[in-house]
Each structure stands twice: as structure tokens, then as C-alpha cells.
Image: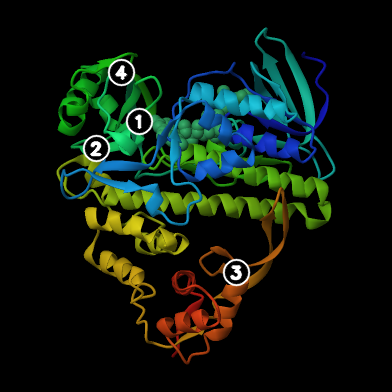
Amino acid sequence: MPGELDSYDVIVIGGGPGGAMASTVLADSGKRVLVLEAARFPRYHIGESLLSGTADLMARIGVLDRVERDGYIKKHGVQWVWGDSREPWTVYFKDALAMPYDYGYQVERGPFDKMLLDNAREHGVDVREEHRVVDFTLPADAAGTGTVTYRDAAGRTGTAEARWIVDASGQGGTVTRRLHSQGWDPYLKNLAVWSYWKGATRPPGVDAGNTFLPTFDEGWWWFIPLRDDVTSIGAVVDSSVLVKHRADGMEAYYTAALERTPELAERLAGARRVEGLRVARDWSYVYDRFAGDGYVACGDAACFIDPLFSTGVHLAMLSGFLAAVSVNTELDHPEVGRARVLDFYENAYRKEFARLRAQVYFLYGGHGTNKDSYFWHARSQFDVPGIDPQQAFISLIAGAFAHRSWYSRYLRQLDVPGQLRDTIEQIFDGKSTGVGVDPQRPLVRSDGFTVVEDLAVDGAHLRPARSIRTAGGASLALSPPLERLLELADGTGGSVDLVDRLVTGGAGREGAQSLVHEAVSYGLLVPAT
Ligand SMILES: Cc1cc2nc3c(=O)[nH]c(=O)nc-3n(C[C@H](O)[C@H](O)[C@H](O)COP(=O)(O)OP(=O)(O)OC[C@H]3O[C@@H](n4cnc5c(N)ncnc54)[C@H](O)[C@@H]3O)c2cc1C
């Protein structure tokens, strides 16, 4: 009831996947947590396809069994009509060897988000639905408290206070929008137009739950199979389409675009639309800061990439988890230092954002067949400002070396510049270590990085750990194998030799290859002069 809310350790604004994850982990660590959620759940939300890595996050807060019991559709892979030919091709999560689960889920966000929020309640979180945050103040100093003013469904206002505020309010960014500047990505200014169908044809067997992503001249489609024979079908196009087709209306555009995608039209023969059309702008953005004194922003309140790789819920839950362990650490171990904790959070979330965004650029860039189309042309550049795409993708591979059969599949199908393709293939084959690096040429440890005292996740807290900061600003954990590699690089052997030495020392070959490649990609090892 308004007026009765008092002091909390943490107030979370928004009860979507990011807020539910953050609040549950904090409550599990004994914190008094209040979630203020503007809507009454279940509420509609877009974002229905989950990455397989999200299953791991769901298991952490004890909801994976419930998702399984509730019979959400399992997706074992993604079928694409993307790249050089219109022949459909499929990638399977089982081929991404390093993943703990070889499937993800397709979820209706209304019941799914409600289940996450109910679970937070069951873990001791004080959840107030239909409580919209209308104002806030931040703590004046590390010992102070911030306040949050809310309005409930009856229009009454009230105030609650806490040492920390977690902004999990989605694209509205209650805290971030007021305090920080939002950078828009000029390459990912998209618009989504979607609806729901019944009776669409699904492939047989294990492929029935797969996402299907066919392209057409002005964009691409998602086909996401949901429970009860419902399928979510949406087009992602350039945002200028809305202006161009204002006169005919988006209904006419949606229908005409479907007809221009034969592989999709075929699956919809005999199917019927069961809902009206929905339209949303899905421009990619990132705020210049994700955290500051007394607050952290997670999920869409900090950044958003694009619907293409289904990264939104994953990033929201991952950053919700990281926000919780960061806040836990600051509250329970103030001696660690607020600045260090915030620095850790900001770096960790930005790194994951950049890694997944590189993958999205790569996929857009790889559909090079439609040179006359504005949509594809504008996104087919491998020269995004501020990002070296070659380096970005190679870093991506470094972080996911064990998924190489997966990436090899993409390389076979996509229109990737020849030099980049060769480099990546050679890296996978163990014949190269990075762009323009001769694998036989002796390598030495470079002077272009520093080792800093940092933090790493340990259960629901952060513990001291050492990291490497590169001249380019990247941050990498200084693990014992990486330390060993830096010692081994004494200018007497090239990358192939270094891999052999690591293997002789007991490392697995794949892990050793990945490590050497990562060290070269980030400029930690350089050719001896
Ligand atoms: C077209 C499109 C397609 C997408 N497809 C996918 C997909 O297939 N897979 C995927 O993983 N992601 C997808 N996404 C992204 C996904 O929807 C989001 O990234 C995800 O929902 C972010 O979770 P969140 O917890 O940060 O925010 P949200 O899920 O948006 O939750 C924020 C909550 O905060 C509440 N709130 C807002 N303001 C206030 C306030 N002032 N006071 C109190 N409460 C407030 C809202 O009511 C809401 O419940 C898609 C996005 C778009 C636009």
C-alpha cells in the first residue's frame, strides 16, 4: 500500500526478465528487494525466441524445470534462407560444442515473464505490480540512500528508499534516459511488423520448433513456433519503409512482403492470421554509461542490439545476474570499493554486448546477394565506423573457438569477403593465428597491455582477480593458462609451436589453439622483430 513502503537494500524498476533475474539473485543472498513494475502481469511483450545459453541462466534461479513442465516449444536450431542461394540451411545448437544446453525455448512472453516474476516473489522479493516509477533521486554518497517515487493503479503516489537502484525498465530507461546519452547505431535502424498465425506448416521431428529466418528483397522474416499451434511471424525492414508505405498502410505491406517470400508463403498455405498487426521501431542503441553511484542499468535500459540473433532476453538476464552480484559485493564487502565494482559491471556487460553485436553485423554483412536493395546494401558493409569488423569477428571466434563447426556452417553459406573467410578458415584449421600473422614467425609478449587488479564472478559475489587491459580498451581475464602462455612466448617459437608447448604442458589442443589465437587477436603476443 502507498505510504507503507519503507527502506530496502535494493529497489528494482521493472519486472521483465532483467528485473526478475536481478531481484531473485539479490533476494537469494539475503537482501531486502522491492520490484516496482508498471504493468499487471501477464502483459504482452515481444521477444519470444531464447538463446540456448539462457537455459543456463534460468537454471540458476530454479525455473528451468518449470519452463520444461509448462511445455514451451524447444528450438534445437535455426533454419536460414540467407546468403548466396535460396536453398534453406540449418545450424544446430548441438554443434556449438561449448554450450551446456543444446536447445533453447520459444516463449510467449506474457506467461513466461509472469512465471519469472512469480518466482522472484517466491524467493522473497517484494513485488508490486501496477506501480509505475515516476521519479527518483540517487544517493549523495556511498553511505546514503536513493529514493524512488511511484504511482499505483489508483493514482496514489508513494516513496521508497534503498542503497541501490537497479534500472530494469526496458527501452524506457527510467534512470539511463535522464542521466546518460543514448548512441544510436546508424547501421541498425530497423522496423518490425508482425502478427500471429495458426495452422502454419512446421518441419517434422526435431526441427519443428526451430526458428525460420528467410530473407526477402527489403529485409528478413522471423517464424517462431509457439505453443497451441500459434506462430509468431514478423518482418524486419528499414525504418524508412513506414514512411514510404504510409499511404497503403502496413497491412498491405505485410501481405505483399509475405507473397514476395516464397519459402514463407509455402509454410502459410492454409494458415490463418489470428491477431492484428503490431509495429515497433527496433533501433539499436547503447548508452554511454551503464552504472554510476548508487545505480546499475541492466537489459534494454542499457543497450539493445537487434532482433536478428534473439539476444535481448539473454542479455537482460545475464546483465541482471551481473548487476545482482555487483550490488551484492558492494553491500557485503564495501572494502572492495564501489568504483571497482561498477567498473567490473560496465566492462562485463559491454563486452558481451559488443561480442553479440559483432555477430549481428557479420550476419547482415553476409547476405550480399541483394545489391539493389537499400536494406541489404546499407547493412552489407563490413566497415562499421568505430569497429574493425575483421578484428571484431575474429575476437568473436576467439571467444567461441569451441563452436567452430557452427561458424564453419555460416562461412559456407554467407557472402563473406575472401580474405576474411580465408583467415577464419585457417584459424579453425590451426594454420593461422590471426589477421596477417605467419604461424611460424616467432612471437613475443607485447608491451602494449597492462595487468590490473580486477574482479571476477564467484557464486553470487565478485572476488579479486587479475585482468589484462589492452591499449584498445579490451579487458581479458588473466587466467593461469594465459599467464603460462605469456611466459612461453620468448621469441623462439611461432603460434603453432606455442600451441604444441601448451599441449605438452597438459592443455587440450582446442583450448590451446583458442588461447593462442585470442592472445594474438588482442595484441598480447606480437611477432618478434
Ligand atoms: C521487434 C523485436 C523483436 C525481438 N525479438 C526478440 C527475440 O526473439 N528474442 C529475444 O531474446 N529478444 C528479442 N527482442 C528483445 C527483447 O524484447 C528485449 O531485449 C527484452 O524484453 C529486454 O528485457 P528487459 O527485462 O530489459 O526489459 P522488458 O522486458 O522490456 O521489461 C521492462 C519492464 O519494465 C516495466 N517498466 C517500464 N518503465 C517502468 C517504470 N517507469 N516503472 C515501473 N516499471 C516500468 C515495463 O512494464 C516492463 O515490464 C526483440 C525486440 C524487438 C523490438
Whether disc 1's CB lies below 8 Å from ligand 1 is answered: yes
| CA gap, disc 1 and disc 2 | 12 Å
**In this rendering, would 300 be left or right of 145?**
left
Query: Residue 214, which numbered label?
Result: 2
Residue position for label 3: 468
Amino acid under disc 4: Lys
> Is 444 above or below relative to 372?
below
- How far across and down, in percent of the image, does residue 11 sit? 72, 31
Residue position for label 4: 198
Residue depicted at x 28% and y 31%: 240
> Is 288 above or below relative to 469?
above
Sequence-first tag of 2 and 3: 2
**In this rendering, would 121 be left or right of 470?**
right
Amino acid under disc 2: Pro
| CA gap, disc 1 and disc 4 | 12 Å
Specify whether residue 180 is in view.
Answer: no
Residue position for label 1: 224
Crowd around label 3: few <14 · some 14–19 · many ≥20 (10 Å): some
| CA gap, disc 4 and disc 3 | 52 Å
In the structure shown, which secondary structural element does the residue marked by tag 1 occupy?
strand
